[in-house]
Image (cartoon, grey):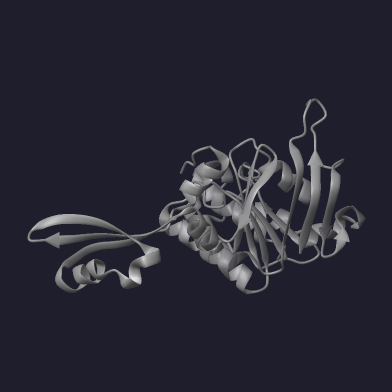
Amino acid sequence: MFKVSDLRFRYPKNQVDTIKGISFEFDKGEIFGFLGPSGMGKSTTQKLMIRILKNYQGEILYKGKNLNSYDKSIYNDIGVGFEMPVLFSKLTAMENLKFYRDLYPEGVKIRPLLERLGLWEDRHKRVAAFSKGMKSRLNFARAMINDPKVLFLDEPTSGLDPTNARIVKDMISEFRHNGGTVFLTTHMMHDVDELCDRVAFIADGQIREISSPKDLKVRYGKREIRLEYNDDGVASKQVFDLNSIKSNEEFFGILRTKDIITIHSGETTLDEIFIKVTGVKTHE
């Protein structure tokens, strides 16, 4: 769907490149996570791919054609949800969505979208009176209003309670299931783990890793099994090497004779991988 090759970009007043020769691609029907610390090039890359920023070096292909060869009709294919909601605060939720929908030749029905996101009852309320979570949900609705083929989403669950975050994530998954493609930037590693087929980590304008969340967790984790079990009323812990586990009689003896409290593999988390790869802690 998109192929980025040796992409470089420097803001006019800067002395060094913000984007330093990155390359990646993602396919139709894929959710591709683009992760990294704040200020390291995520938003710049996204803005280059949706043509807000230009004058880059390298190549960006959309469906096999140079991005710059498309006219403005390309925006009919693209839905964008910026981290900071792009909404008119003096208009109602309904007026906002009607305004944006009318910019495109086709769009989706507004009522089902607002009902799904729990905003239908507030459709005639001015956006200025909306909470942060309501604005975030309306911002997501705006990204979906033109029935896009590709979604560019930046922190789509920011400010949402668990129930509404679940709704948004389900809608993203359904969009992908129906053939849509998603480019996702977020610091919410739980969202990444749940949604993304593959992820790229960027730091200091360079790609540090690209793989599936599963592969990364296996590669960066420890090949071990950690057991916690009841040993005559005392909680005991023991660690076993996963490479030799099939012939470890002590391990199977504990399983047969002790009450197991917990059992875990040494698989690491995406938060820990983020820190190792980029050197910066995530936040939620």
Residue name at image x 89 percent, y 52 percent: 68
Residue name at image x 7 percent, y 58 percent: 233
Q: Nearer the viewer, residue 95 or 67?
A: 67
Left or right placement of residue 215 versus residue 265 in this view: right
Residue name at image x 72 percent, y 54 percent: 99
Q: Nearer the viewer, residue 120 or 137?
A: 137
Instruction: State which quadrant residue 71 falls in.
Output: bottom right
Q: In what quadrant of the picture does the N terminus appear?
A: bottom right
Q: Is residue 181 above or below residue 126?
A: below
Q: Is residue 183 above or below residue 131?
A: below
Q: Position of residue 18 (x, y in %)?
A: 74, 35
Q: Is residue 41 visible?
A: yes
Left or right placement of residue 128 versus residue 183 in this view: left
Q: Is residue 133 above or below residue 213?
A: above
Q: Position of residue 240 (x, y in %)?
A: 31, 60
Q: Nearer the viewer, residue 231 or 156?
A: 231
Q: Is residue 233 above or below residue 281?
A: below
Q: Is residue 93 visible?
A: no
Residue name at image x 60 percent, y 37 percent: 38
Q: Position of residue 52 (x, y in %)?
A: 79, 44
Q: Position of residue 164 (x, y in %)?
A: 46, 57
Instruction: State which quadrant residue 61 falls in.
Output: bottom right
